Amino acid sequence: MNPLISSVKTVFINTFKTEPLLIFSPGRINIIGEHTDYNDGFVFPAAINKGIVAAFKKSDSDKSTAHALNMDNSIEFSLENLKPSQQGNWENYVFGVIAEIQKSGKKIDNFNVVFKGDIPAGSGMSSSAALENSIVFGLNELFNLGLSKHEMIYMSQKAEHNFVGVKCGIMDQYASMFGIKNNALLLDCRTVESQPYEIDFKDHQLMLINTNVKHSLSDSAYNDRRFVCEHISKLLGIKALRDATESDLEKIKDEVTPENYQKALFVIQENDRTLKASKAIEDGDLVTLGNLIYGSHNGLQHQYKVSCDELDFLVDQAKLNNHVLGARMMGGGFGGCTINLVAKNALEDFSKSASKAYKDKFNKECSVYSVELSNGTHIIS
Ligand code: GAF
């Protein structure tokens, strides 16, 4: 049995002397389409074979418990009047989901959950969506709530808005819930429907490099960006930046700061790059795909300003290597991973040279991962 599953199961059985319901909920990568989701735009994520395993069972006690094995931290709580605890705590993801279920009018009783993940924290692979989805999916199953997958992901997202304080879009929760093995999902964040694309880059593959840094203030910077986009949409008289063209934006140039103009321009261009990337994948045109990925990073770095020195350095390392067709920061930014499109026969070389250069520059190790594209949140049979 997979070691993650067996460690969660063993702790659960040792503690509660009963067989649990086991759920796996994956993290995600994103090929392209960053900060477009909360602008009703397009994104191109995939669920991966790293994620969270959660074990559940109903409890007869008048309290519920949650045990985060990675943190070796366990809490007991009452289901009534759940409030967010000190910012940044893992229990807010759990409490937030429970509160959203309750808000919807569905009723749950006390339960015990034990969970553990193998997504490095702060890596930009969305351990938070994996955790939220594992909780909502597990409780839906345990208490027969009859929630659809769409209802579940909106609850996960709202948990993050209301209990964690990050006004995230829907990409992470969607990808984690709806992932399809060996596929990436071209997701329209307005209709919240996606089209699967089988990913087989032949002699190339995706590789992640984790900077192993997460700069503080990233949550407030994220919310600020979202606010700017909404403000500009209002000025343009549209629902979201997805509906704007570059020439629409040009017309209100005088009404916004040059910085905010660049941010909105980035979103419009990133949306366009994402659609072009799906076409490049259909055509098997990896050079074009790689250039779009580099273009995405350039915009995230210079226009949207959500990158950092460590991410920029790793992307520059990729550019120095002819066997890397594209590289960019992935996720919200300010740390976490770069995603790289690399020739299979150059994976080891690039991994070694980038790791050495990173160590020399920052006196810190980066971590290299290759991931498999996987199915979304499911019961472990
Ligand atoms: C984070 C958010 F949670 C997503 O909704 C998305 O906006 C992403 O940053 C940036 O593309 O992962």
Image (cartoon, rainbow, N blue to C red):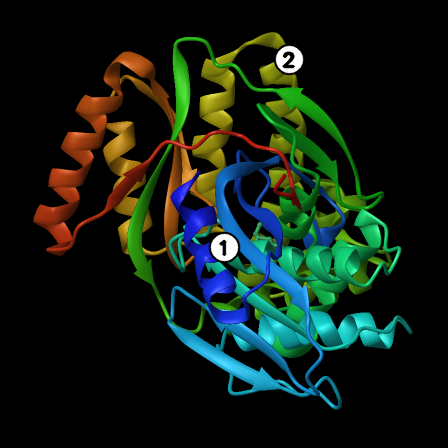
Given residues 13 and 203, the one toward you in this image is 13
Does the numbered disc 1 mark a residue whose Cβ is under 8 Å from ligand 1? Answer: no
Is residue 363 found left or right of 90 in the rendered image? left
Q: In the rendering, at what x and y percent does residue 124 appear?
A: 45, 52
Earlier along the polypeptide chain: callout 2 or callout 1?
Answer: 1
Name of the residue lying farthest toward the bottom: 81
Using the image, determine if residue 61 lies above or below residue 173: below
Given residues 116 and 239, the one toward you in this image is 116
Using the image, determine if residue 276 lies above or below residue 153: above
Q: In the rendering, at what x and y percent does residue 227 appear?
A: 66, 69
Q: Amino acid at mark 2?
A: Glu
Q: Amino acid at mark 1?
A: Lys
Q: Secondary structure at mark 1?
A: helix
The answer to whether one can see residue 36 in this image is no
Residue at image coords 23%, 47%: 366
Residue position for label 2: 282
Q: Could you say which disc has been placed on residue 9 in the image?
A: 1
